[in-house]
Amino acid sequence: MPWQSPISPGYSWYEATVPDRPEFPQMAGSCKADVAVIGGGYTGLQAAYNLARQGVDVTLIDACRFGDGASGRNGGQFGTGQRAWADETEETLGHERAQLLFNMAENAKRYVLDFAGQHDIDIDFMPGQLSVGHKKSLEKDYRDHVEAMATRFGYPHLSFMEREETASRLGSSRYHFGIRDAGTGHIHPMKLLVGLAKQAALAGANLFEQTRAQKIERKGTAVVITTDRGTITTERVLVACNAYIGNLEPVTASHVMPIRSFIGATEVLSAYPNVLPGGESVDDSRFVVRYFRKSKDGRLLFGGREAYTADNPRDISTHIRRQISEIYPELGNVEITHGWGGSVGITMPRTPFCREVMPGVTSIGGYSGHGVMLSNYCGKLYADLVLGKPTELDLLKALKIPAFPGGTRFRSALLFLALSWYALRDRL
């Protein structure tokens, strides 16, 4: 019987197409380590891999199985840059910092592709990204963005698409215009996750699944993690739980908020060759973004219907089908073979959260739906930090990330109201 994640609803097409997903043991009793990592997604596993290969004694634990969170269930899109466009960041942080943050994201893109290539991990990379506008009023912003990226940020891979080209590349006339990014692409996220876990184990990291961290305490010169399987005594800790932080660490929990997002996979669309004929991934201009792409075998993987509560929809496919039909009416009755969801960690400004939350304890997360590249790279950068190497992690530490208002009691309710308002504006 297929494994069902206890923290994320549905059985994903990703899981169904990775038959060799390894299982790792539970931690058995207490232990010591130079570095402990909490969270077995991209960030945590990259940190463990890069530390272990340099001889650091590192122990990683995850409350569920590796890939049960966003790293194994996401939309698979790389994107380009940070979550906000570089020219938007320039307005608030100035050109120099905006350029450095953009360069960091480009380094992240190269790092992931190089990592997969060096270790012969077939991640189903497919090139191309389309960012499409659902409101005519956004056209100037899109045109200006293409020019700014070429002239001020040294990124010549964007081109503006008029309505006719947008419709041709999408196979839909639903959007008014768009941007084509020839310098990025999309992947099979679970294949990357599985390959990464295997490499971390081969490097010598001690990896444990179904081992839940319950408390983190500073005791003298050491940090002690209490788990449901024993304790870990260590010098340094990386908290890499992202949207699944829960009540483990209060500073992170006040700055990183989980929201739900859901994805459906259709049957192979051999009868609909006009749907994304170039195989690009797509994101649209809604605040409650819709994101979709073609898999290598010709399925439409469609994500959307973000929900700002912890509740799961009773039938993921029904809601996803409705959104697919708005863009591709001809697919209104197509079979949806898999439907799944999970939590995305967001911050108020949609920039990653990176902070030392107590002496010796660093927390990284809040990638805000833009984490396929950044989470992998941030794990590598944390390892660089521990090893005393120069690290771009300082760029993220310098960002001002305010806590969500309302405290633990009202934070979720206020977020629901605010983002529901933005979702309403998407329709106007």
Image: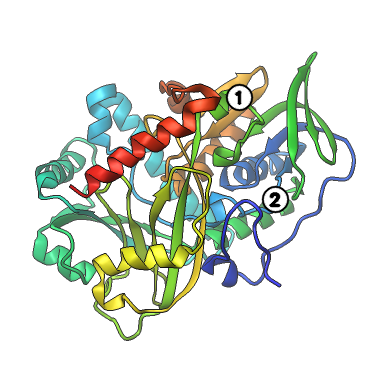
As shown in the figure, which amino acid type bears the numbered disc 1?
Pro
Q: Residue at x 76, y 55 (%)?
A: 24
Q: Taking 221 as reference, is 16 left or right? A: left
Residue 58 in the image, given as x and y percentages of width and height: 74, 38
How many marks do you count on the picture? Answer: 2
As shown in the figure, which amino acid type bears the numbered disc 2?
Cys
Q: Taking 381 as reference, is 159 left or right? A: left
The residue at which mark 2 appears reads as: 64
Residue 287 in the image, given as x and y percentages of width and height: 29, 44
Q: Secondary structure at mark 1?
A: helix
Q: Is residue 13 above or below residue 307?
A: below
> Which residue extends farthest top?
220
The residue at which mark 1 appears reads as: 250
Compare residues 74 and 277 and report the one nearer the observer. 74
Q: Residue at x 21, y 41 (%)?
A: 149
Q: Does the CB distance between marks 1 and 2 fall below 8 Å?
A: no
Compare residues 169 and 342 and report the one nearer the observer. 342
Q: Residue at x 44, y 61 (%)?
A: 263
Compare residues 129 and 344 and report the one nearer the observer. 344
Q: Secondary structure at mark 2?
A: loop
